[in-house]
Amino acid sequence: MLLVIKNLREIAECFRDGTALPEELALWLERSLREFLDRRCHSIDEALGLRFAKGGVPWWLEEGMRVRDAALRTLAERFYPGESTTARAAAIVALSDRFASANWPIDREHAEMPARYRGTPKEYLWHAFRSGAPMPLGERRLRSILAGAAGAGD
């Protein structure tokens, strides 16, 4: 599924830049659209190969969870080195809760991260919140993410 997302992003960039699609991408897109238009698939997601297991999370949420989790892990590594997973999680939960109430209501309207966040914990919180995955998280879930536990979005 990640390859499908990569293909779609590459196609979007070609359209934005006004460049020709590489032949393999053009053929893939044509086949996918033909599958949908010929009603061999129930949805455009299915035609493109964006399937998820029943009860699973949609592709866009899975992608967002991966971005969020990576941002939170980087935050923990950069600003809480040497701390236990429990201590890191507790600190990040407190930061996230403050960010959610004080910063995110304003920041959510901006497509770009405020420059003043660069190099601070808020840089990583902004990316985590911007990912579209649920934020803020509870301490238990955050401990799992920081420990690298396998799960949806890891």
Image (cartoon, rainbow, N blue to C red):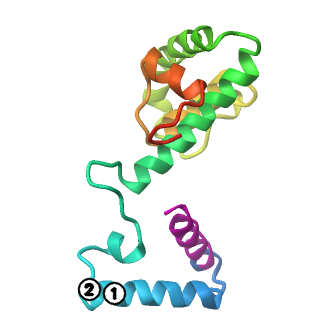
Number of marks:
2
Pick whichever, 116 or 82, lies toward us. Answer: 82
Pick whichever, 98 or 82, lies toward us. Answer: 82
Identify the residue shown where x is 27% and y is 48%.
Answer: 55
Identify the residue shown where x is 54% and y is 28%.
Answer: 145
Mark earlier in primary sequence (1, 2): 1
The secondary element bearing badge 2 is classed as loop
Say above or below: 23 vs 153: below
Residue 66 visible in the shown view: yes
Range shown magenta: 1-14
Identify the residue shown where x is 34% and y is 87%.
Answer: 35
Q: How far apart are marks 1 and 2 (CA)?
A: 5 Å
Residue 131 visible in the shown view: no
**Marker disc for residue 35:** 1
Q: In this view, does 106 lie to the left or right of 72?
A: left
What's under tag 2, amino acid-wise?
Arg
What's under tag 1, amino acid-wise?
Glu
Q: In this view, does 136 lie to the left or right of 118?
A: left
Say above or below: 14 vs 30: above
Q: Main secondary structure of the magenta part?
A: helix
Q: Is residue 148 left or right of residue 142?
A: right
Return the x and y of residue 43 as percentages of the image width and height: 27, 73
Q: Residues within 10 Å of mark 1 (few under 14, many from 20)?
A: some
Return the x and y of residue 26 as percentages of the image width and height: 55, 88
130 in magenta: no
Return the x and y of residue 58 as percentages of the image width and height: 36, 53
- Tell me whether circle 1 and circle 2 mark residues in contact (CB < 8 Å): yes
Pick whichever, 136 or 145, lies toward us. Answer: 145
Say above or below: 80 vs 20: above
Q: How crowded is mark 2: few (under 14 residues within 10 Å), some or many (20 or more)?
A: few
**Marker disc for residue 40:** 2
